[in-house]
């Protein structure tokens, strides 16, 4: 695993422990950032279910001002912290450990700046058990509240697990299939759709 572009281009990253995550391939990561735009200067990012932080660190390399990383697995958090140290970006990051839906409101405090880009990359086994109405209320409503007006949420899911058009105040803007995974991009629901 390595960073593809930006100031940290070609920096090697520690991978997740075998069997603990499904690392995103370089091709899929390149495509996602191609859809988002190469220059992320000044954006505030959150990388949820981050594993070892490859998406958030890629965003920082491409100019993001700050990234909050969240995961519940201690081994992943240790590797994430080592990756952050190796990339020398600790002052531009926050690391949170715990159950994401329940802890998210305290991590993304209302008085803090809004988040411009949010990656949501749950374990596929977790995503396959999601009740969309419940996860919309418990997770995506909180994300919509903290998302900047033009912000985006990038959701990675196992193939054939099709998310709803509307999810916790967000609406589906684009969806792509890559091998065994789907990538859905959400933004705020337009006023006429509320």
Image (cartoon, rainbow, N blue to C red):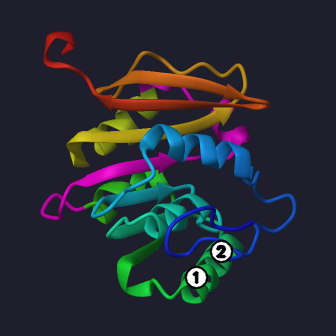
Please say if 58 is above or below 140: below
The residue lying at 21 percent from left, 11 percent from top is: 193
Q: Of circles 1 and 2, which is in front?
A: 1
Give the residue displayed 37% in from the left and 37% down from the top: 140
Percent x, y of residue 16: 76, 67
Q: Is residue 117 magenta?
A: yes
Quarter of the rendering occupied by the C terminus: top left
Provide the residue span drawn in magenta: 109-133
Q: Residue at x 56, y 58 (%)?
A: 55
Q: Which residue is mark 1?
A: 81
In the image: residue 169, left or right of residue 33 = left
Query: Who's the residue at 87% across and 63% down the image?
Result: 18
Q: Which residue is mark 2?
A: 74
Q: Disc 1 versus disc 2: distance between alpha carbons?
A: 11 Å
Looking at the image, which is closer to me, 172 or 110? 172
Task: Tell me if residue 106 is in the magenta stretch.
Answer: no
Residue 85 visible somewhere in the drawing:
yes
């Amino acid at each position: 695993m390595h960073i593809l572009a930006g100031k940290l281009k070609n920096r090697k990253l520690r991978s997740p422990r075998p069997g603990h995550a499904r690392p995103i391939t370089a091709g899929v990561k390149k495509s996602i950032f191609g859809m988002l735009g190469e220059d992320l200067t000044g954006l505030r990012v959150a990388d949820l279910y981050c594993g070892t932080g490859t998406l958030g660190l890629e965003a920082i390399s491409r100019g993001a001002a700050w990234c909050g990383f969240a995961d519940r697995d201690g081994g992943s958090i240790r590797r994430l912290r080592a990756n952050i140290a190796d990339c020398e970006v600790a002052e531009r990051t926050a690391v949170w450990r715990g159950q994401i839906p329940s802890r998210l409101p305290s991590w993304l405090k209302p008085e803090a700046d809004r988040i411009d880009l949010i990656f949501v990359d749950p374990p596929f086994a977790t995503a396959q058990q999601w009740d969309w109405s419940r996860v919309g209320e418990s997770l995506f409503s909180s994300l919509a509240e903290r998302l900047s007006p033009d912000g985006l949420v990038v959701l990675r899911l196992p193939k054939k697990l099709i998310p709803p058009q509307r999810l916790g105040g967000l609406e589906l803007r684009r969806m792509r299939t890559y091998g065994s995974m789907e990538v859905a991009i959400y933004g705020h629901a337009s006023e006429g759709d509320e």
